[in-house]
Image (tube, rainbow, N blue to C red):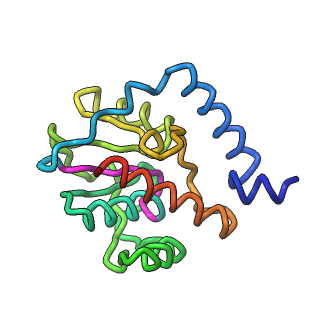
Amino acid sequence: MDGKVYERFGSRTGFARYLGYWLLALSGKYEKFTLDPPERSRRIVFICSGNICRSPLAEEYARKLGRETASCGFHCVEGYPADPRAKAFAESQGLSLDNHKTKNINHFEFRVSDFVVVMEPHHIGLFRQKFGENYALALAGNYCDRPNPYIHDPFNCCEEFFMRCEQRVVEAVRGICG
């Protein structure tokens, strides 16, 4: 049983979060974080925890789709490269994360016109605590074919789950960028 949980949800905690956020989503709690896709002229800023797995992939894929984009992380040190597994996944999608360097949200310059996309519902509170409610704020997972507001941080997870998370990021970006 644990093997299936780790492959599908990353960990027992990941399963609990996935289920909890899914139930909250069913109650409508996160509907307001599914905005209409942004106009082509708006910059899309992707935010995750470490800015090494999810948000750099989202940034690069959205750029490939012709969008102005950027990424940063809540809990990262400046200047680190993308995770090697994220780089490998990106390459399998025809993308390159070779030039990516982490950027901490505290050093990122937001624009009022930015369309801000976070990976987890917990990130909503963190973002609003730092920057207020004047930004268009969306949950990446709400734009997937089978919406769930929570895209787990795959950093310490098994290879299969890592790839599953990165695929959900790509799916979310496709939903956001149309």
The outermost residue toward the right is 1
Q: Nearer the viewer, residue 141 or 157?
A: 141
The residue under the point 50% across, 36% down is 122
Q: Residue 146: horizontal and vertical position, in percent?
A: 53, 43
Q: Does 164 sit left or right of 121 as displayed?
A: right
Q: Which of 151 and 38 is in front in this view?
A: 38
Q: Which of 99 and 150 is in front in this view?
A: 150
The outermost residue toward the top is 27
**Relative vertical location of residue 17 with respect to residue 162 in this rendering, above or below:** above
Q: Does 66 sit left or right of 81 as displayed?
A: left
Q: Quadrant of residue 64?
A: bottom left
Verify whether residue 37 appears in magenta: no
Verify whether residue 45 appears in magenta: yes
Q: Nearer the viewer, residue 127 or 29?
A: 29
Q: Residue 142: horizontal and vertical position, in percent?
A: 45, 39
- Label tally: 0
The residue under the point 25% across, 50% down is 44
The residue under the point 37% across, 59% down is 58
What are the residue bounds of the magenta stretch?
Answer: 43-52
The residue under the point 51% across, 38% down is 149
Q: Residue 74: horizontal and vertical position, in percent?
A: 42, 49
Q: Residue 109: horizontal and vertical position, in percent?
A: 20, 49
